[in-house]
Amino acid sequence: MVVDIKKKSTFNLQPIHQTVSVTFNYNVYFTSCLFDVKNPLLAQVIAADGEEGPKKIAAVVDGGLLQFRRELLRQISAYSEYYPDTLTLAAEPMLVPAGESAKNNPQLLEQIHQLVDKAKLCRHSYLLAVGGGAVLDLVGYAAATAHRGIRLIRVPTTVLAQNDSGVGVKNGINAFGKKNFLGTFAPPYAVLNDSTFLTTLNERDWRAGIAEAVKVALIKDTEFFDYIHQNTKALVQRDMNTMQQVIYRCAQLHMQHIANAGDPFEMGSSRPLDFGHWAAHKLEQLTNYSLRHGEAVAIGIALDSTYSYLLGMISRLEWRKIIKTLSALGFTLYIPELAEHISQPEHPRNLFRGLSEFREHLGGELTITLLQSVGKGIEVHEVNLPLYREAIKVLSTEC
């Protein structure tokens, strides 16, 4: 049937409503010696996609790992050769700097995109990210933006990455002096936690990752916080079984929140899993990232817990237990940057500028998480700056 437009004087141009539902599935695996050819896990994960023929993969590796795992690149190549029917290493593994510097250099993002192009990866190929949380964030952003999304397999190699950033859906890099200014929400294809990487961590990196476990325990699970509190000595002494329990429960709580909290891509103004993070992000910037992310989170937790205590939301006994736990784990809970230019609201090095930056990053109104009790967080939209300044003074004397 042909409609004569000339005979139609007006059109009823009503809005067209459309709802699109997308289901994301990904698994987090726990293993050891992942790249040993006798461990088939990686090959099995790739083969499970149900598509025939070997899949192209490219690997981006945290350069800091080679100090302790000199054979890592050779192992990745040998693994590909051992499972030729499942995967093909389409290019030599690419090395990127360790730590936050990986997220501060935009040229690295372009280099990964060049790797994807050179290796002729497609949306059915795999980008393997092996490293700490910052490297995973960088590679995840590159994977999400190449061909509008290449399958990403994360291999977190630090405590922090295995129990937090590695199992989430966020990717990003820093820009304009702000944490994660550029980024995506893009779930990985799979996460492979290899405990053997943790054995070579230095003391700072081993400890720093525990801060995210304390965070999620404080806002989600009283029993989990009690477990951490009761096992601080074992964690400090690097008992691997205790650490594995912490990592597993922390990852489990994070994934439950992502799946069941109703806003996995943070379309609203809330980031409840970022308890202590508004200050942590600013402190990382103020220290030129000499603070590990987990170290900054520990300070942010201490600050927001102290503020919650001064508001009368948690008891002094609860507050002291939190501070004692963080201190027993070896965290420094007060640094000069907390109080630097505290009386000058507009000074760029004023900590509380982090509140406006946090709100800007979320969009909408300011939303931060405080403690209603140990194991239960509560969101607030306004803060009492004089009381926050008092919280800093308390930390300076108590810690």
Image: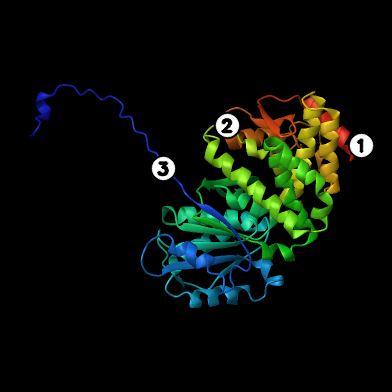
* First-in-chain label (3 vs 1): 3
Q: Residue at x 92, y 36 (%)?
A: 397
In this view of the protein, can residue 333 be seen by the observer? Answer: no
Q: Which mark is residue 397?
A: 1
- Residue 184 location (% of width, % of height): 52, 47
- Residue 239 location (% of width, % of height): 78, 58
- Distance Cα–Cα, label 3 vs label 1: 51 Å
- Distance Cα–Cα, label 1 vs label 2: 34 Å
- Kindly identify which residue carries mark 3: 22
Q: Is residue 355 above or below residue 205?
A: above
In this view of the protein, can residue 52 be seen by the observer? Answer: yes
Q: Residue at x 40, y 39 (%)?
A: 21
* First-in-chain label (2 vs 3): 3
Label 2 residue SS:
loop
Look at the numbered discs 3 and 1 and tell me whether their residues touch, using CB distance below 8 Å.
no
Q: Quadrant of residue 314?
A: top right
Q: Quadrant of residue 269?
A: top right
Specify the quadrant that holds the C terminus: top right
Which residue occupies the foreground of this view, 13 or 83?
83
Q: Residue at x 60, y 66 (%)?
A: 61
Task: Using a 10 Å C-alpha cutoff, classify the residue at mark 1 as few (fewer than 14 neighbours), some (14 to 19) or many (20 or more).
Answer: few
